Image: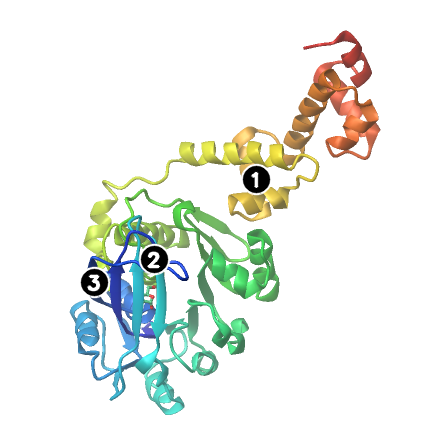
């Protein structure tokens, strides 16, 4: 099985700044670095450094020699790359002191892909081979169509999100690797849990890998849901973290790893890339990743559990009357199904039981501290069915609300 990455190559102009410049603001930079980059190039390098054999296709400009050089030095096969007389695509990247970035792109040579060129590349590949794509080249829809006809396994990282993706048939993809913002854009749903459900409903055969930054990553294939915590790291520059993750994930899968293992290795590689400046230069080699297993720790289960408990309490406090599992799932960044199971595991109780308990506690306080009638209090905490609430209240406090008020239990 061969891996072809049909994608962009950019020259990245990276400006280090205190903070990302806002509209109307001017900030002087103290440092400019010029790095090889582009989502395509970064992902090819990640695959190769992860030990995978990858062919890169795409167009470089007259000024793009350093890009093919770094690809070759990383072990990428560059024989399908087309050299053009146009200016190479480039990216202007601001990196803030806390490692966040902001990017704009000039496509240049990356938008010189033609149908003949696509055909000349694809004729070297066959059914079952993997083709990896991002959204920084033109003719994306055509490449997907042709790769699909050949029976290739198509992996799309729909980044950056823009209208070019509208013409791409997502039903032809095998994998999609995307972040939270991209998942919302692709599905048209603002809530992440609904976004994932929508993608699953529209494309039932599509395998989805969702990256959630500090919250880790998730793999969903319709039947299974695997989660991986992020690894702790001091962020220097987050540029290409997603590309490193994608490249490593594909390389791991292609060597036969289970999705759970692929997620873990990809997460660790991405964490290492975040600790270094630049796009391509920050992508680690496999040896470094394997070595890092000994020193890097995942966000511990305890920390995640504490954070989830805090978020659960906070969510119930702020949404007592309207609380629902899906709303909490959105806050946690998980699907509703996963959240339900997770909360049960974390607390030993279901979300509904916890909500009922919280409502009883708040109602008990109101009974003692206000003059509102019991009916008003029941409505204020979110119940229409008074009998249901009274029964639950009695179970928790051993008396009904009026007795509770009369006895002035503190
Ligand atoms: O994903 C990071 C990349 O996005 C940068 O290297 C830049 O070129 C942009 O394409």
> Farthest residue in the top direction?
407
Tell me what residue is drawn at x 38 percent, y 89 percent. Answer: 114
Q: Residues within 10 Å of mark 2 (few under 14, many from 20)?
A: some
Query: In the rendered image, which quarter contains the C terminus?
Result: top right
SS state under label 2: strand
**CB under 8 Å between callouts 3 and 2?**
no
SS state under label 3: strand
Q: Earlier in the sequence, mark 3 or mark 1?
A: 3
Between residues 11 and 132, which one lies in front from this camera angle? Answer: 11
Name the front one of labels 3 and 1. Answer: 3
User: Measured from the top left, where is residue 282 in percent x and y?
Assistant: 23, 58
- Distance from the alpha carbon under mark 3 to that under mark 2: 14 Å
Q: Residues within 10 Å of mark 1 (few under 14, many from 20)?
A: some
- The numbered mark at residue 30 is none
- Distance from the alpha carbon under mark 1 to that under mark 2: 35 Å
- Mark 2 highlights which residue? 101
- Mark 1 highlights which residue? 341
Residue 126 seen in this snapshot: yes
Query: In the rendered image, which quarter contains the N terminus?
Result: bottom left
Tell me what residue is drawn at x 19 percent, y 53 percent. Answer: 287
Tell me what residue is drawn at x 27 percent, y 86 percent. Answer: 86
Model colouring = rainbow
Q: Residues within 10 Å of mark 3 (few under 14, many from 20)?
A: few
**CB under 8 Å between callouts 1 and 2?**
no
- Mark 3 highlights which residue? 32
Between residues 33 and 85, which one lies in front from this camera angle? Answer: 33
Tell me what residue is drawn at x 43 percent, y 79 percent. Answer: 140
Name the front one of labels 1 and 2. Answer: 2
User: Measured from the top left, where is residue 136 in percent x and y?
Assistant: 38, 74
Q: Earlier in the sequence, mark 1 or mark 2?
A: 2
Residue 43 seen in this snapshot: no
């Amino acid at each position: 099985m061969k891996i072809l990455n049909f994608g962009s190559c950019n020259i990245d102009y990276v400006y280090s700044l205190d903070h990302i410049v806002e509209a109307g603001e001017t900030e002087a930079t103290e440092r400019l670095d010029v790095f090889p980059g582009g989502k395509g190039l970064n992902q090819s390098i990640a695959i190769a450094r992860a030990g995978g054999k990858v062919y890169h296709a795409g167009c470089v400009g007259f000024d793009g020699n350093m890009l093919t050089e770094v690809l070759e030095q990383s072990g990428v096969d560059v024989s399908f790359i087309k050299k053009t007389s146009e200016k190479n695509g480039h990216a202007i990247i601001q990196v803030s002191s806390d490692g966040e970035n902001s990017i704009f792109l000039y496509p240049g040579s990356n938008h010189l892909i033609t149908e003949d060129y696509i055909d000349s590349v694809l004729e070297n590949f066959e059914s079952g081979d993997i083709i990896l794509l991002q959204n920084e080249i033109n003719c994306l829809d055509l490449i997907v169509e042709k790769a699909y006809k050949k029976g290739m396994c198509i992996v799309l990282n729909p980044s950056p999100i823009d209208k070019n993706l509208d013409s791409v048939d997502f039903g032809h993809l095998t994998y999609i690797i995307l972040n939270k913002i991209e998942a919302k854009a692709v599905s048209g749903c603002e809530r992440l849990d609904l976004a994932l459900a929508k993608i699953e409903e529209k494309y039932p055969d599509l395998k989805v890998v969702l990256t959630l930054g500090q919250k880790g990553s998730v793999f969903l294939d319709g039947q299974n849901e695997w989660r991986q915590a992020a690894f702790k790291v001091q962020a220097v520059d987050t540029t290409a973290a997603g590309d490193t993750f994608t490249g490593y994930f594909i390389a791991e899968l292609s060597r036969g790893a289970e999705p759970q293992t692929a997620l873990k290795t990809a997460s660790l590689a991405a964490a290492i890339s975040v600790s270094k400046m630049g796009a391509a230069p920050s992508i680690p080699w496999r040896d470094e990743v394997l070595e890092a297993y000994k020193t890097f720790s995942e966000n511990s289960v305890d920390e995640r559990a504490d954070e989830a408990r805090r978020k659960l309490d906070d969510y119930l406090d702020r949404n007592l009357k309207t609380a629902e599992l899906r709303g909490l799932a959105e806050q946690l960044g998980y699907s509703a199904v996963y959240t339900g199971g997770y909360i049960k595991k974390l607390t030993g109780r279901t979300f509904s039981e916890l909500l009922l308990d919280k409502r009883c506690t708040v109602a008990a306080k109101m009974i003692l501290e206000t003059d509102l009638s019991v009916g008003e209090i029941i409505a204020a905490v979110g119940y229409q069915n008074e009998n249901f609430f009274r029964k639950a209240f009695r179970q928790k406090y051993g008396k009904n609300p009026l007795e509770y008020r009369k006895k002035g239990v503190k």
